[in-house]
Amino acid sequence: MTFKPAHLLVALLVTALPAMAQNIATVNGKGIPASKQEPYLKQAKAQGQKDTPELRAMIKERLVGTEVLLQAAEKAGFSKNEDVKLQIEMARQQILVQSLMKAHIEKNPISDADIKAAYETAKAQNGENEYHPYHILFDKEDDAKAAISKLKAGAKFEELAKASKDQGSAGKGGDLDWISQANVPPEFATALAALKKGQFTETPVKTNAGFHIIKLDDTRPLKFPALEEVKQQVGDGLVQEKIRAYQQTLIKQAVIK
C-alpha cells in the first residue's frame, strides 16, 4: 500500500496519539505518565473523595510541581551526592521491609479472638486493685535492713527516702503514684499486695533493681478499660509482636557469620 503525504500524516498522528495520551503532562520535554496519578486517585477515593476533573487537575499540578523539583535536584547533582544516595538506599530498604511485614500480616492476620485473649490476659495480670505505694531502694540488703530498723524506731519514711537509689521518687518521699501489679516486678507486686494501709515491709524486697522497702499508702478498685476502648491498641501490639517473632524466625534461619 502506498500512502499519499496527507494520508501518511494522518497515519502518523493516529499512531502517536495513544503514546501521547499516556502522559498527563510534560516538563522540559519529559513526560509524566498517567499511571503516576493512579495512587493519588486511589488514596483520595479511599478518603471519600470523588473522581472529578478538579481532583485530577489538583493531582496533575502536584505531580508537575514534584517533577520540576526533581529535575532541578538532578541538575544540581544531588543524585550523585553520597549522603543523598545513602538516604535513598535507606528509604529503599525501609520500603522493602515494610512491604514484607505487611504481606506477612495479611497472610497471618490478627483475629478478634486473639485480641480478646490478649485483653483478658492483661486484665488478669493487672489484678482487681490499684495501689499507691512509696518505696526506698538500696543497692545493699544491709542498708535496707538498717533503714527498716530506723523506721521501726520512729524515723519518717519520706526522710529516709531521700537516700533512695531511685532518684525519680527520692525527691517525692519515695512516692510511686498509683500503679497496678502489672507495672512492677512480680516480687514487688507480691509484697505490695500483702500490705495493709500504712504498713511497710519489714524485710527487704529483692528485685533486679536492688533491695526495696515498700510502704502502702492506699488501695482502690482498678478501673480497667473496656475491650472496645483499647481494641485498636491491643491489636496494634499483637501485630508488633507477630512482626518481631517473624523477624526472629528469619534471623534463626539465616546463615550469620
Image (cartoon, rainbow, N blue to C red):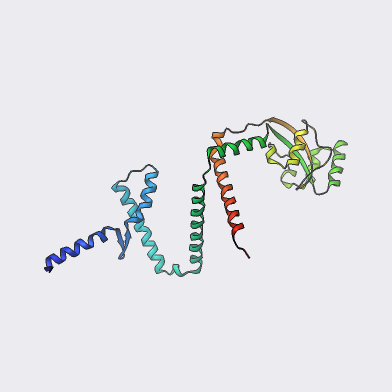
**Is 97 on the left or on the right of 23, as rendered?**
right
Left or right: where 96 falls relative to 3: right
Using the rendered view, name the quadrant where residue 235 is placed.
Answer: top right
Instruction: Write down the quadrant of residue 198 in the picture.
Output: top right
Q: Residue furthest top?
A: 221
- Residue at image point 59% right, 33% down: 225
Q: Where's the N terminus, which quadrant?
A: bottom left
Q: Nearer the viewer, residue 172 or 72?
A: 72
Q: Is residue 94 above or below residue 204?
A: below
In the displayed structure, 196 sits above or below 56; it is above
Residue 167, position as x, y percentages in the image:
73, 47
> Can residue 177 be seen by looking at this rendering?
no
| Residue 176: image location, x then y, percent | 71, 40
Residue 114 appears anywhere in the view: yes
Front residue (pair 216, 115): 115
Q: Quadrant of the C terminus?
A: bottom right
Horizontal placement of 56 versus 109: left or right? left
Please name the residue shown 23% across and 63% down the image: 16
Give the vertical position of 171 relative to 19 (above or below): above
Residue 122: percent from the left, percent from the top? Answer: 63, 38
Left or right: where 221 falls relative to 236: right
Residue visible at 51% across and 60% down in the picture: 93
As rendered, which of 177 and 8 lies closer to the eye?
Answer: 8
Q: Quadrant of residue 3?
A: bottom left
